[in-house]
Amino acid sequence: MTMTEGLREDLLPNGVRSRIVNNINGLNIHVLEAGYEEPGRECLVLLHGFPELAYSWRKIMVPLAQEGYHVVAPDQRGYGLTTGWDGDYHGDIAPFRLFNLVRDVMGLVHALGRQSVAGVFGHDFGSPVVAWCTLIRPDIFRSVALMSAPIGQAASVAKLSSGEDVHTAMAALPRPRKHYQWYYSTPDANGNMMHCPQGVHDFLRAYYHHKSADWAANTPYPLKGWRADELAKLPTYYIMDLDRGMAETVAEEMPSPDEIAACTWLTEAELGVYAETFTRTGFQGGLNWYRCATTNRFAPEMELFSGRTIDVPSIYIAGKSDWGVYQKPGDFERMQEGFCSDMRGCHLVEGAGHWVQQEQPGEVVRLLKQFLASQQAHSHSIVSEIAKSLVLRVFWVRQYAHTVCDTVRKLRF
């Protein structure tokens, strides 16, 4: 496989194709597509997170296409077969900031010949991208599905209520700890995962297992605040031991051969797609997203949207065993209390951890179909109301015309 080719057909479900869309905001973007055969279909865009790929949507693309949609999932900037991005840690990280990731998606929509799309759905770090798509251009992105990562407000800075730096406080705990996003922002993170003793394949197997419903200790609950003592309740894939990298952290939770054989949501052949890809690209492209998030460099442009809400129809879907729901205390609640002003549903799916659309694709498809149908019903209702209003207006105009004619006749005779 070369970087100018797509994924081999034998790696994809029937009905999904792979291709490269060139010259988009400096990128040549690799996409997976379903429902592309019939022109004129409404479009859905699906955005993955870390460490994932467009391939992460493989289980739900054809079922959504069967509902009459053209379904498109790109490898985002920094990932997979998409090229044109700089993976040097010492390079400029500005292209990986959220505003430019939105620009990537807008460029892809335009390249597909679309003025707008019916929905943009994002999982994990794809969730803030789709949130900002709808905040910045709700005219283009007409509905949104947030998965795993809830979005509580347009711009926020989380600090200890006492004013003490949370990272200093975590490092001072009896069991010294550190936050994974700030670890991912260090120069050592990519090499730790790329060159780990167990190899990329086993690293990813342990990482995906550790954050799934298969890991029995994933029993999440709300935290009381952004404080070191509360954050330390999160599993080690979020709040790591201070002296360990991510490779060592997840190695302790490597599933047994029997557990691997029983993992039907991520077979060895499917895992091989991820392992082969990240062995080739490394992880730095995706890690640069975290570096943008943990610096204050891009905060001023995001603060322009402070107070803005997501006003397009929205839905939230996550696994019931996903700590991602609560890793930023308060966001799950704020999202429902007003940040998403037209939320059509908030669902925690049984039998799923962090990788909800892979672990329980059938339920995710059911919820998304229901969500999309609610918009169509609402649109039909609006059209019906407009039609009724026009009929009434025509009736009263005709009545008025009859009255004027009668008055004129009386005056003449």
Image (cartoon, rainbow, N blue to C red):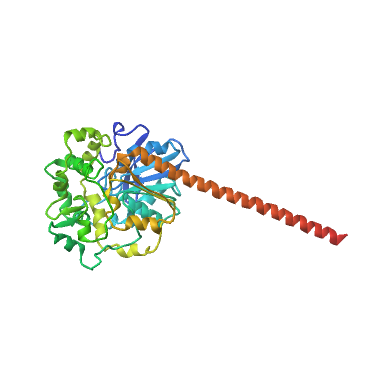
Position of the N terminus, as image quadrant, is top left
Residue in view at x 22 percent, y 52 percent: 234
Q: Please state which of residues 260 and 326 is positioned toward the viewer in this rendering.
A: 326
As drawn, 301 above or below 88: below
Which residue occupies the foreground of this view, 407 or 99?
Answer: 407
Left/right of residue 92 with respect to residue 59 in the rendered view? left
- What residue is at 18 percent from the left and 50 percent from the top? 236
Task: Say if 317 sits above or below 339 in the image.
Answer: above
Percent x, y of residue 165:
20, 65
| Res 333 → quadrant | bottom left
How many labels sit on residues? 0
Residue 92 in sight in this render = no
Is residue 380 at least partly visible in the picture?
yes
Q: Residue furthest bottom?
A: 163
Q: Where residue 401 sits in the image (x, y, percent)?
A: 75, 56
Percent coordinates x, y for residue 103 in the rendering? 36, 54
Q: Which x, y percent locates residue 362?
A: 36, 37
Task: Give left or right: position of 229 versus 21.
Answer: left
Q: Is residue 378 above or below residue 276?
A: below
What is the quadrant of the C terminus in the image? bottom right
Q: Residue at image x 44%, y 43%?
A: 370
Direction from residue 391 to residue 197 in the image, left or right: left
Front residue of 300 and 151: 151
267 or 110, nearer to the observer: 267
